[in-house]
Image (spheres, rainbow, N blue to C red):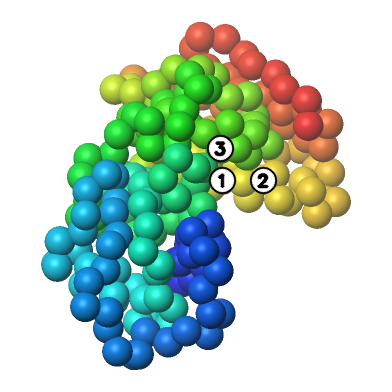
Amino acid sequence: MKSYLASMLLVLSAGVYAAPPQQRVDAPRQATRHIQFNQRDLSEQELRVIEQLEAAYRFRLPDGHYWYDPISGASGIWGGPTAGFLPAGLSLGGKLPANASGGGTGVFVNGRELHPMDVRALSQLGPVLRGRWFVDRYGNVGAEGGPVLFNLIAAARAARSRGSGSGGAWSHTFSDGAGGNNYVGGDSSFGYLMTKNGTFYYDK
């Protein structure tokens, strides 16, 4: 989690302007900071949350406009793709708008229409279908209002394992929430997702 937070602050700052790489948080605080999350300026209490993260990683987040998904913890520069993850459940700015990442893909996660780069990244794990989906802080994924279908973290670990040269077959079983099971699996050449609605195959 610490590495995620550190990379989050670094990537976000690089997308706004180049800040001194070793700028310390314990430098004199600016009189006013201009940081927006989800199109709303942060309150003093919310700024203290950011400052706690900055203090932990000795880096100062530049002024700018950002988006934050409190359900999954995903965050990025306003209009851009996911840059990293903060702890889920924080109170930062306003409600996450659908157009926080620009959109245009028809794939919605927790109400945000994904950026094309988000879709390309997810496609490395399997097919990305247009529609409305949820992703929680644990990486569980499902159709909006429906049961969990699979776990992104498990899928990413499986993909890394395959990429390391293991080449072996793998599979994972998960409940459909109604007493049945779904299955995701594959080997070094293809993958599949089996649900009550059918089986979806994809090439690696």
Alpha-carbon span between mark 2 and mark 1:
6 Å
Which residue position is annotated with label 1?
Answer: 154
Q: As displayed, is residue 62 above or below residue 161?
A: below
Identify the amino acid type marked 3: Asp
How many numbered circles are shown? Answer: 3
Which residue position is annotated with label 3?
Answer: 118
Where's the N terminus, which quadrant?
bottom left
The reply, left or right, for residue 150 in relation to residue 120 is left
Measuring from the top left, give residue 88's x and y in whole percent: 31, 54
Residue at figure coordinates x 51%, y 9% from the top left: 197
Alpha-carbon span between mark 1 and mark 3:
18 Å
Of the two numbered discs 3 and 2 on the same chain, state the one appearing first in sequence: 3
The circle on residue 158 is 2
Whether the residues at callouts 2 and 1 have beta carbons within 8 Å, the answer is yes
**Mark 3 or 2, which is nearer the eye?**
3
Identify the amino acid type marked 1: Ala
Extreme-front residue of the structure: 31
Identify the amino acid type marked 2: Ala
Identify the element where label 1 is drawn. helix
The circle on residue 46 is none
Of the two numbered discs 1 and 3 on the same chain, state the one appearing first in sequence: 3
The reply, left or right, for residue 29 in relation to residue 164 is left
Residue at figure coordinates x 44%, y 17% from the top left: 131
